[in-house]
Image: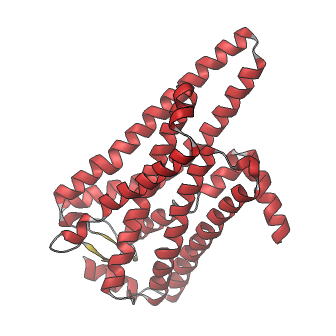
Amino acid sequence: MKESFSKELALRTDALVWIETVLLALINVVAFFGNLLTCYAVYRNHSLRTLPNMLVIALDVSDILMSIFCMPFSVVTLFRGHWIFGESFCRFVGFGAFTFGFASLQTMGLIAVSRYYCVVKPEKYAVLFKKQRALLYIAVVWCVALVGSVPPFFFNNSGFEFHPGEAMCLYTFERNITYAVFLGLIYIAAPLTVIKICYAKVFCSVSQSNRVFSLQNNLQQLRANVEEAKVTKTLAAVMVGFTCCWLPISVMDYIDVAQGKSTFSRQAYLTYGFLIYLSSAINPFIYGVTNKQFRREYKAILSQIL
């Protein structure tokens, strides 16, 4: 099947080559500059330098790294029709994609837990989520991501190889079923479950508090509660966007694991690759749509540049 995908990649029409290359290049540019814009917005505007936005920046950093160390090589591959960078570099790129993806998901788990404590247990939030501790948590997230992505290097065959269908270097899950199940349970299912539980409890708590404050006519508390709800909705929207991109990817991976081979068409796998990269490009748009402060700061920065 790999040989078939390699031939399809090499024998595309000129029109298809340009369409695929330009589309991925556009995603690459948006991912890099969009996330960089978000980082600069937080740096420039002191009112945006909040703890939730520190975690947002951590998420943006993983997306920027993806746009630097992974995406450009897929763009070149789509243009040239084959991987030209060698096997060793392919393993490095595959390892990077693995690590950055894990770091993004674990960071979203950390964001969800911080929202839970901020809204549901505010008395503990002030102790557990000081800025210095948040930096420690971010470091732990990256260590956990590395722990999950390093093991393939110790297998007989690392499993990081070029996938012509996706036009990128990835880990081949069919190589080690036990490891694939481990990742599915610990690195994907567990954080997603934590995220869903945390946001469910947060929105339930906000709804109950709003009713209480409305009955008490406590406008100050009600306003504060609404602001926390807005922040939570923005961060929950980021999680939904990430899930929409990665859920089809995970389903395809585990179907292939169950079958023991690639079972989809090249177009499906190319969409798979595009979704991986698209997940790194959508967050700035989500912030702009759901958060007035970010939207205002984006406009101010872009008006100065343009």
Residue found 33% across the figure and 86% down from its top: 7
- Residue situated furthest top in the rendering: 216
Q: Residue at x 45, y 44 (%)?
A: 109
Quadrant of res 61? bottom right
Q: Is residue 269 visible?
A: yes
- Residue drawn at x 54%, y 23% as measured from the top left: 204
| Quadrant containing the C terminus in the rendered view | bottom right
Q: What colour scheme has been applied to the protein in the rendered image? A: secondary structure
Q: Position of residue 134 (x, y in %)?
A: 52, 47
Q: Give the residue at x 38% y 86%.
A: 83
The answer to whether residue 264 is above or below residue 192 is below
Q: Residue 198 location in percent, x, y?
A: 47, 33
Q: Is residue 70 left or right of residue 40?
A: left
Tell me if 95 is positioned left or right of 124 in this view.
Answer: left
Looking at the picture, tell me which residue is in the foreground, 159 or 18. Answer: 159
Residue 39 on image: x %, y %: 65, 60
Q: Eyeballing the image, is 82 above or below 55?
A: below
- Quadrant occupied by the N terminus: bottom left
Q: Nearer the viewer, residue 32 or 163?
A: 32
The image quarter containing residue 210 is: top right
Task: Please give the count of numbered marks on the rendered protein.
Answer: 0
**Horizontal and vertical percent for residue 26?**
60, 73
Residue 243 at least partly seen:
no
Between residue 36 and residue 277, name the one nearer to us: 36
Answer with left or right where residue 102 lies relative to residue 75. Answer: left
Q: Is residue 268 above or below residue 199?
A: below
